[in-house]
């Protein structure tokens, strides 16, 4: 699973933004990472399939946040925090 998460720099950027803010919508993630809207959606879809993030809909807005119930998410968070990446 970790190889799929760290497979691309873009995916890692998306994870960092979500960890940094606790939750974020697609536009916020795109602005923070410099990735296109389409690339952000692609990375979010993959991260959601892996159980790393979860989506919450607030009206028409899609908010993404870490899936803290997953122990891998806590491990990744602690790893990035210890490396001063977030």
Image (cartoon, rainbow, N blue to C red):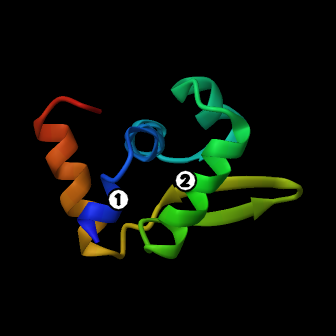
Residue at position x 11%, y 39% from top?
82
Instruction: Indicate left or right for 85 with 46 as reference.
Output: left
Q: Earlier in the sequence, mark 2 or mark 1?
A: 1
Residue neighbourhood size for the residue with mark 2, other residues' Cα within 10 Å, grouped as few (<14), some (14–19), many (≥20): some
Residue where numbered disc 2 is placed: 43
Residue where numbered disc 1 is placed: 5
Name the image quarter holding the N terminus: bottom left
Is residue 64 visible in this depiction of the protein? no
| Image mark count | 2
Name of the residue lying farthest toward the left:
82
Residue 4 image-quadrant placement:
bottom left
Residue at position x 53%, y 68% from top?
48
Please tell me whether residue 1 is drawn above or below residue 74 in the rendered image.
Answer: below
Question: For the residue labelled by badge 2, is the local secondary structure a helix, a strand or a loop?
Answer: helix
Per the rendering, the mark at residue 75 is none
Residue 30 image-quadrant placement:
top right
Q: Position of residue 57 (x, y in %)?
A: 76, 63
Q: Nearer the viewer, residue 48 or 64?
A: 48
Is residue 22 visible in this depiction of the protein? yes
């Amino acid at each position: 699973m970790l190889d799929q998460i760290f497979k691309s720099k873009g995916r890692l950027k998306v994870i960092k933004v979500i960890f940094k803010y606790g939750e974020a919508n697609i536009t916020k993630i795109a602005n923070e990472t410099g990735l296109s809207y389409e690339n952000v959606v692609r990375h979010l879809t993959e991260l959601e399939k892996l159980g790393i993030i979860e989506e919450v809909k607030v009206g028409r807005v899609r908010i993404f946040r870490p899936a803290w119930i997953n122990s891998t998410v806590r491990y990744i968070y602690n790893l990035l925090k210890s490396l001063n990446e977030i």
